[in-house]
Image (tube, grey):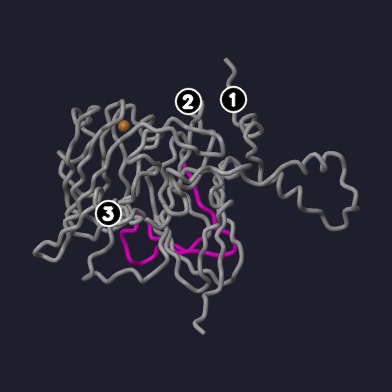
């Protein structure tokens, strides 16, 4: 059987190397005008993917700034999310989440047979304030047993990972627990074989903001970024890497940010089959709040490494207008789709 390895897949789909793209546009100082033959060959490389991925079922740009189904029209949103004030001032937050099989487009023309929460990968971002009550009605309308396992404090009956806690196809389960501790967490399926169930796409972000008595994080432009990857030929090695599923999505649609405005990134690594993943941001540094469980940063850096399941809130403010590249600092991941751009613009002044 013909097996598509990483390199031949690259050639087949038009994802090309950053090194190649830079070589195509760069000339060393003092180099004569005529490029040597092998240099000319590199001229055929392009940066990123060729063509566009449909945004009909998943829009990576909308995903960045959506939580609690805020991307849906109000009538549609009511079907999946409700909040009810409680006597102590906290909220009951109720969610309707379902697992469903769906082929998703991860690079132009390349479809992956995913298992999804609510039809897309990553699943919907769940966001609450510390002390709120979370109630998730989970329905499995997929073809395999699944579960929801939330990171955070909860009793064993709500873990979703213990023997017998799988939810069979056609069945449902209600997960209910308090949002604790504040920080950046995640949820994912915890059915065995675990690496297959996670890698197929069953994961999402779970943000818990600190209760007001602790003091709040300052207002910011907030983004959710999930570092993920896809093993398209099921050889336990990834062929496509991305932030938020679609290879090079933010190269084609740079993320708009405003010069001088605080940017807060909720960064989560769910990459399967590789020990670590990382984010490197060009031209600037950022503050790191590991797991988001403190209001005081522990580190200032321009490169952050996270193990699978690890996450961090990072904050920075763009000083200059223009394009700022970000990517995994493992060059291979960057070349296979994990690369994007921020596009910083000056704030519009009122006239
Ligand atoms: Cu599963």
Q: Identify the mark nearer the N-term, 1 or 3.
A: 1
Q: Is residue 295 above or below residue 124?
A: below
Q: Position of residue 13 (x, y in %)?
A: 62, 34
View extreme (left): residue: 87
- Specify whether 270 is left or right of 13: left
Question: On residue 75, which mark appears?
Answer: 3
Q: Is residue 179 above or below residue 187?
A: below
Instruction: Residue under label 1, please give it.
Output: 4
Give me the residue at 16% from left, 59% from top.
Answer: 84
The quadrant holding residue 9 is top right
Instruction: Residue under label 2, please give it.
Output: 234
Per the rendered image, the range of residues in magenta is: 276-301
- Specify whether 73 is left or right of 170: right
Q: Quadrant of ligand 1?
A: top left
Q: Is residue 261 above or below residue 139?
A: below
The quadrant holding residue 307 is top left
Mark 1, secondary structure of its residue: loop
In the image, 58 versus 163, the foreground residue is 58
């Amino acid at each position: 059987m013909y097996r598509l390895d990483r390199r031949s897949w690259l050639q087949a789909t038009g994802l090309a190397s950053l090194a190649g793209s830079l070589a195509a546009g760069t000339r060393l100082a003092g180099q004569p005008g005529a490029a040597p033959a092998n240099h000319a060959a590199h001229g055929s490389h392009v940066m990123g993917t060729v063509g566009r991925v449909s945004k009909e079922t998943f829009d990576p740009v909308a995903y960045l700034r959506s939580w609690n189904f805020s991307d849906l029209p109000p009538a549609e949103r009511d079907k999946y999310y409700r909040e009810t004030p409680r006597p102590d001032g906290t909220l009951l937050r109720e969610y309707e989440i379902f697992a469903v099989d769906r082929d998703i487009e991860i690079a132009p023309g390349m479809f992956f047979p995913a298992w999804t929460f609510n039809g897309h990968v990553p699943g919907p971002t769940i966001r609450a304030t510390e002390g709120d009550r979370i109630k998730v009605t989970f329905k499995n309308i997929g073809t395999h047993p699944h579960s929801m396992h939330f990171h955070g404090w909860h009793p064993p009956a709500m873990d979703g990972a213990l023997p017998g806690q799988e939810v069979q196809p056609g069945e449902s389960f209600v997960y209910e627990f308090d949002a604790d501790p504040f920080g950046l967490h995640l949820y994912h399926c915890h059915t065995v074989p675990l690496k297959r169930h996670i890698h197929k796409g069953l994961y999402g972000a779970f943000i818990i903001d600190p209760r007001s008595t602790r003091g709040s994080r300052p207002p910011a432009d907030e983004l959710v970024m999930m570092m993920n990857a896809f093993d398209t030929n099921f050889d336990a090695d990834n062929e496509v890497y991305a932030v938020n599923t679609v290879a090079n999505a933010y190269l084609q649609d740079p993320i708009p940010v405003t010069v001088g405005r605080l940017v807060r990134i909720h960064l989560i690594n769910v990459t399967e089959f590789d020990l670590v993943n990382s984010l490197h941001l060009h031209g600037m540094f950022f503050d790191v709040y590991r797991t988001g469980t403190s209001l005081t940063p522990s580190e200032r850096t321009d490169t952050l490494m996270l193990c699978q399941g690890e996450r961090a809130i990072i904050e920075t403010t763009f000083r200059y207008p223009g394009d700022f590249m970000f990517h995994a600092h493992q060059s291979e991941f960057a070349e296979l789709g994990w690369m994007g751009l921020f596009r910083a613009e000056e704030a519009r002044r009122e006239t």
